[in-house]
Amino acid sequence: MDKQGFTTGIVHGDRAVGNEHGGVHQPIHTSVQYGFERVEDLIGVFQGTKKGGFNYARQGTPTTAALERKITSLEEGVGTICFSTGMAAITATFLTLLRAGDHLISSRYVFGNTNSLFGTLRTLGVEVTTVDAGAAENVKNAIRPNTRMVFVETIANPGTQIPDLSRIGDVCREHGIAYVVDNTITSPALFKPKAVGASLVINSLTKTIAGHGTALGGAVTDTGLFDWSAYPNIADEYRRAPAKEQGLLQIRKKGLRDMGATLSSEQAHTIAVGAETLALRVKQSSENAFALAQFLEGHSAVGKVLYPGLKSHPQYEIAQALFKGASWLLSFELLNAARMIEVVNALKLPIKATGLADTRTLIIPVAPTIFYEAGAETRKAMGISDGMLRLSVGIEDIDDLIADFSQALALAA
Ligand SMILES: *Cc1c(COP(=O)(O)O)cnc(C)c1O
């Protein structure tokens, strides 16, 4: 079939493989064991010669496999492995592809738990350098002979910094380094990291792809661009697979199978249904975030507004060139931080909650919550002031959101 549009592919993909009774969704397969008429087929599944077979649900079920196909198609990759959470996908990727003595370069602005995971990697003997990835030079200058991987996020939370994604891709290609891009905030509806040369793409499915705050999940997708036959850390038993498959094969066996952070079929189904409206939701929430950002930028009680769709954003040009929209993530500073509690409590629509990419707008004061443990000094170094508020903008009607912010901000005037 000709290449279909993004949403057409999502909503018609499941029945393309032919479901029982003409079901238009993939069924939820709850079996842990998978049996065979002929023992040769059981052996074939174990040895990888019988493709697409299942043996034990920790390594996947037909339902998680269907979601993996869906994510692969959205990211235009060659394969995907799903996990129980986004952090599980990131952890499995690092722990299976990096060894003691290796060096990892990461953007300084990454998800807090990913940053905390770097501490664990260091205790295991992996060197981790964090740089301001807004300039590709900083990544290039940090490269050492033992550098194996570069890790960045498309839009950082809460500061909305964007790395120089294309040029970092060039640097990684020139040096034969694996380039891992966490696409959670943008999702493939706004950006495909394959376009900037990513080797592996991470998505926390919990966020933009599932979209309703009802399921946890994570995925790692191989774009097919990286030459795993030249990567030193692939175990001999996986060298027998075609070069393109070696990276993911090692993550599936050593990561998913051995570490065991498996996505359940029930959650995979919920995520697959959520994904059907991915493009529609992201379009609406990005438009809302842009309108709200413009409103906030013009408000006298508001200081800095951090949103990549605004001309005032330092990486506005990159966002325009690479992303289909500037996403639902928006942060801003209340000039009078002493009024913060009052203002947030006065908001009627946004839910006072952590979490990202729900259909409902969520709001959280950054300094006393997600960056509390980091301490005042780190917050200062990261540009997080006491009055900073982070919004995950939902799909509500924009007039309702603006009216609500308008009445609440009046208290800080
Ligand atoms: C939330 C998040 C993760 C982790 O995902 P979970 O599904 O919550 O484990 C990873 N990266 C980014 C950018 C995130 O926002």
Image: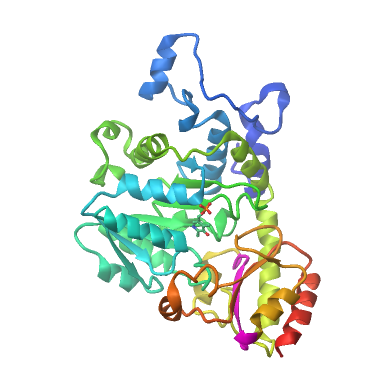
Magenta segment: 325-338
Name which quarter of the figure residue 365 lies in: bottom right
Is 27 placed above or below 218 here? above
Quarter of the image containing the C terminus? Answer: bottom right
Q: Residue at x 27, y 34 (%)?
A: 239
Question: Quick check: 41 left or right of 356?
Answer: left
Question: Quick check: 223 left or right of 97?
Answer: right
Q: Residue at x 68, y 63 (%)?
A: 285
Q: Residue 314 at x, y = what percent?
A: 50, 79
Q: Residue at x 53, y 39 (%)?
A: 263
Residue 330: in magenta span: yes
Q: Could one spot residue 226 in this view of the protein?
A: no
Is 19 placed above or below 177 here? above
Question: Quick check: 16 left or right of 168?
Answer: right
Question: Quick check: 259 left or right of 271?
Answer: left
Name of the residue lying farthest toward the left? 145
Relative depth, front residue between 319 and 56: 56
Name which quarter of the figure residue 47 lies in: top left
Q: Could one spot residue 81 in this view of the protein?
A: yes
Residue 247: in magenta span: no
Relative depth, front residue between 311 and 108: 108
User: How many discs appear?
Assistant: 0
Q: Residue 195 at x, y = what percent?
A: 46, 57
